[in-house]
Image: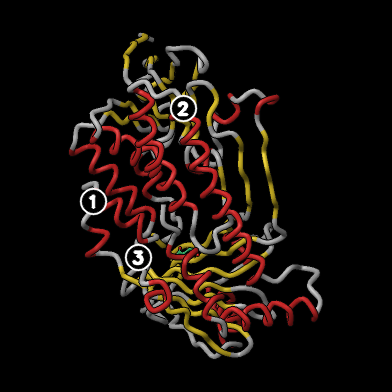
């Protein structure tokens, strides 16, 4: 095993969308980076995640030169349907806040970013092992890993960034006495499917029902993404295609919708969790994206939040490397403000639309009351539209 040593400005642990977007923005500012990931590129590309981009996320991808594909292959959605109490109610983002979102899956965002890194000669190493970081409070923090050929590497940097996802190793480097972790668990999960069928609707349907929540999303003209609330311990093997369709049809049928059916090509159970670690900076290590915070999927804030983090981080890192001592703490403060707004938004959408296992008739009627007050109030609908399409930065 040879040991090779390199130096860079910013060493990035985790080359998912947050890490790659950061590396891309830094390069545009003339700052070098090395990004690593324990997963192979194929593994990341084949992990299905959410599909909705806020308008500022779209703008970031387009204006920084990552992707035009997001505009031509993505689908612009100017609203959503909230379905409850026997019918659907459209929330018209365009009319309420003059904004829209883009249906464009996270896997495509990742592919665009990975291609942009390759095009621009970025240093990204996928499929590495034995990752660790050292000297995070010193001037020369280090990232260590073993590459796919078994060669040990050490990268000395000025700053380390932990964008290593919800199973982050970097966040554990914060001393326990200096960090706080905030959690919320939920007594349900999502059963997610991909199916080969035409779209059942042009926009997303968020459907509340006595049987529980369902979300009808899309991918392309021939591939659709749908979810329904299930028990976190649900076994996908117990769900034949017929049983899945019966459940989905029952949940949206209660609100007057009928789904186009087709062969189901993927079934997964997705856990729900709210999590934040504060602060997001310790010494010369900063966290970004899921490494610092997780939101439940309702409202699709996870990727958007990660992109918002690194947009701010790239700005503040540039200032920090030019000698501005307050810049890293400013990043943490600016990021956390948005993180807690998104935590609330995701929690609110989740608890408004899902059925708790012990829900009484009162609880279900109260949710319908809340949804009714939302859709019959311009102020209420505007609040949802602002949060969904993304708050200005
Ligand atoms: C999708 C996922 C979400 O969590 C959401 O709120 C909207 C869409 C999706 O995968 O398409």
Upstream in sequence: badge 1 or badge 3? 1
Crowd class of label 3 (few under 14; some 14 to 19; many from 20; radius 10 Å): many
Q: Secondary structure at mark 2?
A: loop
Where residue 130 sits in the image (x, y, percent)?
48, 22
Q: What residue sits 46% from the left and 50% below the top?
A: 305
Q: CA distance from mark 2 to mark 1?
A: 27 Å
- Left/right of residue 34 with respect to residue 201 in the rendered view: left
Q: Are marks 2 and 1 in contact (CB under 8 Å)?
A: no
Question: Which colour assignment does the render follow?
Answer: secondary structure
Crowd class of label 2 (few under 14; some 14 to 19; many from 20; radius 10 Å): few
Badge 3 residue CB within 8 Å of ligand 1: no
* Residue, disc 1: 63
Upstream in sequence: badge 2 or badge 1? 1
Q: Is residue 153 visible?
A: no
Where residue 325 sits in the image (x, y, percent)?
44, 23
Q: Secondary structure at mark 3?
A: strand
Crowd class of label 1 (few under 14; some 14 to 19; many from 20; radius 10 Å): few
Q: Nearer the viewer, residue 224 or 291?
A: 291
Q: What residue sits 46% from the left and 27% below the top?
A: 326
Q: CA distance from mark 3 to mark 2?
A: 35 Å
Q: Are marks 3 and 2 in contact (CB under 8 Å)?
A: no
Q: Nearer the viewer, mark 3 or mark 2?
A: 2
Numbered tag placed on residue 326 in the rendering: 2
Where residue 8 sits in the image (x, y, percent)?
32, 19
Q: Secondary structure at mark 1?
A: helix
Q: CA distance from mark 1 to mark 3?
A: 15 Å
Numbered tag placed on residue 102 in the rendering: 3
Q: What residue sits 44% from the left and 60% below the top?
A: 390
Numbered tag placed on residue 357 in the rendering: none
Badge 1 residue CB within 8 Å of ligand 1: no
Q: What residue sits 41% from the left and 77% below the top?
A: 203
From what the image shows, is residue 94 above or below residue 133? below
């Amino acid at each position: 095993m040879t040991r090779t040593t390199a130096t860079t400005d910013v060493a990035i642990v985790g080359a998912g969308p947050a890490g790659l977007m950061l590396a891309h923005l830094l390069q545009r500012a003339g700052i070098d980076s090395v990004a690593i990931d324990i997963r192979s590129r194929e593994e990341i590309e084949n992990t299905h995640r959410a599909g909705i981009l806020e308008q500022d996320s779209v703008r970031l991808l387009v204006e920084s030169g990552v992707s035009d594909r997001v505009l031509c292959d993505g689908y612009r959605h100017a609203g959503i349907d909230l379905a409850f109490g026997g019918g659907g109610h459209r929330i018209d983002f365009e009319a309420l806040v003059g904004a829209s979102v883009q249906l464009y899956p996270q896997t495509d965002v990742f592919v665009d970013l990975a291609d942009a890194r390759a095009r621009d000669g970025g240093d990204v190493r996928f499929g590495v092992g034995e990752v660790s970081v050292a000297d995070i409070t010193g001037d020369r923090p280090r990232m260590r890993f073993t590459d796919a050929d078994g060669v040990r590497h050490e990268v000395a940097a000025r700053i380390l960034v932990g964008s290593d996802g919800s199973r982050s190793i970097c966040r554990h480097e914060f001393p326990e006495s200096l960090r706080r972790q905030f959690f919320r668990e939920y007594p349900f999960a999502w059963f997610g499917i991909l199916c080969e069928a035409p779209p059942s609707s042009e926009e997303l349907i968020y459907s509340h029902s006595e049987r529980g929540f369902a979300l009808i999303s899309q991918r392309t003209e021939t591939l659709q993404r749908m979810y329904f609330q299930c028990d976190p311990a649900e076994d996908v093997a117990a769900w034949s295609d017929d049983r899945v369709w019966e459940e989905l049809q029952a949940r949206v049928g209660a609100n007057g919708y009928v789904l186009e059916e087709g062969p189901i090509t993927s079934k997964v159970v997705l856990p729900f969790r709210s999590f934040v670690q504060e602060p997001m900076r310790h010494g010369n290590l900063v966290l970004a994206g899921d490494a610092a915070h997780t939101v439940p999927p309702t409202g699709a804030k996870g990727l958007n939040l990660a992109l918002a983090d690194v947009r701010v981080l790239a700005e503040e890192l540039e200032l920090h490397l030019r000698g501005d001592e307050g810049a890293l703490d400013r990043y943490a403060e600016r990021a956390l403000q948005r993180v807690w707004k998104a935590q609330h938004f995701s929690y609110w959408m989740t608890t408004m639309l899902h059925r708790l296992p012990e829900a009484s008739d009162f609880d279900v009627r109260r949710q319908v009351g809340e949804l009714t007050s939302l859709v019959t109030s311009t102020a209420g609908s505007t609040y949802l539209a602002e949060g969904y399409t993304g708050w200005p930065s």
